[in-house]
Amino acid sequence: MKGLTAFKEKATGVFGGLKPNMEKFEISQSYHGGHGGYEEMEGGDREGRGPGGGHAYDDDDDRPDSPASFEEIERPPLRKIDKYCKAECPCMPARYTIATMACVGFMIAFGMRCNMSAAKLKGEHNGTVFMNWTVAVESHVDSSFFWGYLVTQIPGGFIASKFPANKIFGLSIVSSATLHLFVPFAMTLMHGHVVICVRVLQGLFEGVTYPACHGIWRFWAPPMERSRLATLAFSGSYAGVVVGLPLSGLLADTVGYQAPFYAYGVFGIIWYMFWIWLCFENPRKHPAISIPELKYIEKSLGESAHPSMPSLKTTPWREMMRSMPVYAIIVANFCRSWNFYLLVLFQSSFLKHKFGFKVEEAGFVGSLPHLIMTTIVPFGGMLADHLRKNGILSTTNVRKLFNCGGFGMEGLFFLFVAHSSTATGAMFSLTCGVAFSGFAISGYNVNHLDIAPRYASILMGLSNGIGTLAGIIVPYALDGLIQANPTGCWTTVFTLAACVHLVGCTFYGIFASGELQPWAEPPAEEQKVWAPPAGAITNTDPSQAGMLGDYMKETSFGAPEYNEQSQMQQSNAISYGATGHVANNPFAMASGAPPIAEEDAPPTYGDVSNAGQYGYTQGQMPSYDPQGYQQQQ
């Protein structure tokens, strides 16, 4: 801070005789941000053209800063570990670090769900019924996870609203991973009843993951990056299946059926250590986030001193239950969950029983559709944001296009799977269908943030809770069919799956919306922003002419453009809308004066030729005595 302190002292001496107060401007206007939060807090030496020796946040060296960029930003204190190892991923902004870590967390959570199917196939491969379980017990074991998962969906939304969402997300996964270590031992006790209880507890903990993830994006996702950040995180659920199916099959076949459970339990504990180190509740609490990224996120979302959280009492349940866009999300979630859990629980069985694949072969080949989908999901998010950002399609049309297109194509290819007689044809159709469904994640799965960002975590819990019913119904509906006819039942199974998807496609296409719903508007007190009182600044007071020019120049930012620069230059009004554009201007004059374009360089005080540009006459210009000014120096 030595350079900035010297600049401040010099500026104070030069402009000490002028009316405007410059002392609150702690950061120079030529300040370009970077990854220098540590050096800024500790006063270390700097190298490079970014603050603290970091690189500039973007490549635009001429980017103007907004008025808020001059305000001194209080940084959180460093933890002990931060003094030795900086809490950041190299070459990755903080918000994308959180998205990546959430993606890995979902990979572990969904990989754990693949372990039981691999263990069961290993038991069948040895010519015995796994653990001597009956069909009923086997169905109970498969669905027991979703009993607990269903219970905590809606409460998870409120928990994520009341407590730090990042901590809720991390604790849910590490708790489930710890319980996962006890599953192999529990399977040997009381004919499966103990393992059912353990899996119910796992479901209770993991039920809050999706609501908590939406709670994280409430503070971290700029409106024009919602799709890409959310889909990057949620792609972990599909990447988890990509890795989980082959890895579980390989470990079960080479080491033993217990190995996948132990491996994923350890993975979850290790991941949690990195999560609590790198991820924080909101940008203001991140000690290593760059100043420009912090301003960009807060300006795009809008700022409030104490934004209130929704509670059970303040949530508009009646309006929510009468909203058709909410039902569109719920139906789409149920339909997608039906096909997803169908593949997670029974895809390996389909390949083994109908086409004779071995356990490890079924795992590796079965992961191919989910691998393609994992690459499609983040790409679909970026494409959806591109269409919205450039005004090519409205948010509503983008959500309907991606969701209905993904559902419709998956339903069509599942009909091909149902009637395929060769393994090649079945896998090609299955891969194409699952890949197309990746685009649907940029539809219904981020639609909560469009229609009600304030209640996004609650809506996610509600819709995902209904979707969890599919995970409970599928095992009971299909276990009997598979036991009765393990080779010929798959035509019925995949035809039913195709019909479910086509129903979801039709319902979502009719009733979905991407616009902020009236019942989701923030409270009136949070919409209030500061504005100069009427008559507080007039153009007839020469002593306030300099300040008047400052206010006018601060308000004239030109036409809004959805990028980091324009988002930082918006007003401090809260924006819960689907686009993130804040139209209100907190510095606008109450007198209704027309907006005045900002000049590239401010006029000198001795030059009265530009007086008309600032709304006052030549006689109203502040006087300036060059001789008196030289005497002050």
Image: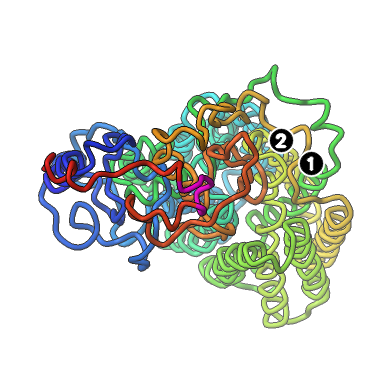
Q: Nearer the viewer, residue 243 or 303?
A: 303
**Colour option used:** rainbow
Query: Where is residue 220 shown, x and y percent of the image?
Result: 48, 44
Q: Which residues are magenta?
A: 612-618
Q: Is residue 187 left or right of residue 394?
A: left
Q: Which mark is residue 366?
A: none
Secondary structure, mark 2, is helix
- Amino acid at the residue labelled 1: Val
Q: Nearer the viewer, residue 69 or 313?
A: 69
Q: Do we see residue 337 in this rendering? A: yes
Figure check: 399 above or below 360: above
The quarter of the rendered structure image containing the N terminus is top left
Q: Are marks 2 and 1 in contact (CB under 8 Å)?
A: yes
Percent x, y of residue 186: 49, 34
**Quarter of the image holding residue 349?**
bottom right
Asked whether 553 or 492 is in front, the reply is 553
Q: Position of residue 535 (x, y in %)?
A: 56, 27
Q: Is residue 205 above or below residue 552?
A: above
Whether residue 441 appears in magenta in the rendering, the answer is no
| Residue under pointer 2 | 462
- In the figure, 127 relative to 518: above or below? below
Residue 614 covered by magenta stretch: yes
Q: Which residue is mark 1?
A: 326
Residue at (51% x, 67% y) in the render: 360
Name the front one of labels 2 and 1: 1
Q: Is residue 117 visible?
A: no
